[in-house]
Image: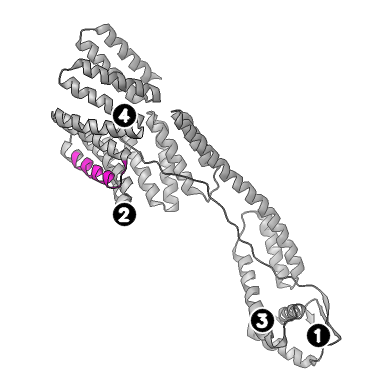
Amino acid sequence: MDNRFDKSGDGDQNVGQGDGAVGKQVNITQQINGNDNIVAGGNVTIEGIPPEVFAEYVAKHSKALGETEQIVRGFLGTLLEREVPRDQWDSKLREIAGQYRELLARLETVQSEDPQVQRLKDEARQAIEAGEYAKAEELLNQAEAIEQMEQTARKRRISAAATNADQARLQRIQLRYAKAAEYWQKAATLLPEDQKKDQALYWGEAGNDLYGIAKYNDALPLFEQSLATSREIGNKAGEGEALSNIGAIHHAKGDYITAQKYLKQSLRIMQEVGDKAGKSTTLNNLATTAYAKGDYATALAYLEQSLRISQEIDDKNQEGSALNNISQIYNARGDYGTALKYLEQSLCIRQEIGDKAGEGTTLNNISQIYGARGDNATTLKYLVQSLDIRQEIGDKAGEGVTLNNISLIYDARGDHISGLKYLEQRQAGISV
């Protein structure tokens, strides 16, 4: 039986940054009706308005707006600077006061991880409260300059992570899975902390590559890291996939009870989130566990569900896996004709989509059908094809199975020397 894993896509993420406008107050001499009106330090005098009337106006609006009289006088200075008509003062004062409170609240609640930026923003808030808008603008400009540098560094880290992910894919093209896993891990560690979804994805991809070359002990902690990260951010789909992959690791190590525990957790999540591809994969993996325990009826039920889903969503990779695995149920029952029918369908699909690992598995399994019929020549032909592919892609576990099966053919022919040669190759591969 073979286990298949989903591969999720990843891409660069564009990081947007908003900016806010900060009102600027300056000391000016404004000409109105040929008379000077001085705006300085928040103290405002207006020609034609008696001081006591103006003071009453300021007090009234200070109470209505919930601000100090000094702040309201500063607002009035802004209205004079912008030459706002007198009949619009009331509405504009409310508008400015609203913006003022919003800005102070934001500076109070939005904290920066950079202590220098946070200090500058705290000082800017204090300057705004004192009506020193020019000083506040300068402080915020300084904070922005630092943030721009940090943002550039952050974007470079995300870009570097994406480049390492591309490096991993390049290694996969060359079937260098261990090297690909190294690049996936480097990509994960480069990502900023707020990119945890992609981190979980990269940990999982690294685990997949190591699983494919039977490095189960190395793959397991990567899947566990992917699981922990997915749970931390509430990514249910990622959690379900990681659980399925951990279950497959325990299955590969022969711990079927633990494997079933993880796989059933995965299946519940896949059903919950409506992930049909993930559900199909997990059903396939549950089937391998039931098969290993000799429960063929349960295994077949899981596989038939997996096959239906994969055909429904046109997942050729998973369809090929399900067909291959269904064949093994019929093979175990001695129904070689039906087993061969499913294997030939699986081989056709796997060759069509270029699934080399799956092709090697199916060729090996076809050989066993002919072996059960006593056709050793045809058996050996398929085994040699399987061995060539498995050696080509570095599938050490599959290579060991095929070498063992080839040795049995030579032993059956009485050629014990050749049989021993293939067994020794198998043992050398296991010890590497």
Main SS, magenta residues:
helix
**Disc 4 versus disc 2: distance between alpha carbons?**
32 Å
> How far apart are the two marked residues, 2 and 3, measured between alpha carbons?
52 Å
Graded by Cα atoms within 10 Å as few (under 14), some (14 to 19) or many (20 or more), the crowding at tag 4 reads: many
The residue wearing badge 1 is 45
The label nearer to you, 2 versus 3, is: 3
Colour setting: one colour
| Residue 129, position as x, y percentages in the image | 70, 72
User: Mark 2 or mark 3, which has the lower sequence index?
Assistant: 3
Query: Secondary structure beneath disc 1?
Result: loop
Q: Say which label, 4 or 3, has the lower sequence index.
A: 3
Q: Would residue 68 appear left or right of 338 to someone viewing this image?
A: right
Say whether disc 1 or disc 3 marks the residue closer to the N-terminus.
1
The residue to which callout 4 is attached is: 359
Whether residue 1 appears in this view of the structure is no
- Closer to us: mark 4 or mark 2? 4
Q: Is residue 337 left or right of residue 360?
A: left
Q: Which of pointers 4 and 2 lies earlier in the amino acid sequence?
A: 2
* Label 3: few (<14), some (14–19) or many (≥20) C-alpha neighbours in 10 Å: some
Disc ID at residue 92: 3
Q: Amino acid at mark 2?
A: Glu
* Secondary element at tag 4: helix
Alpha carbons under labels 4 and 3: distance apart: 74 Å
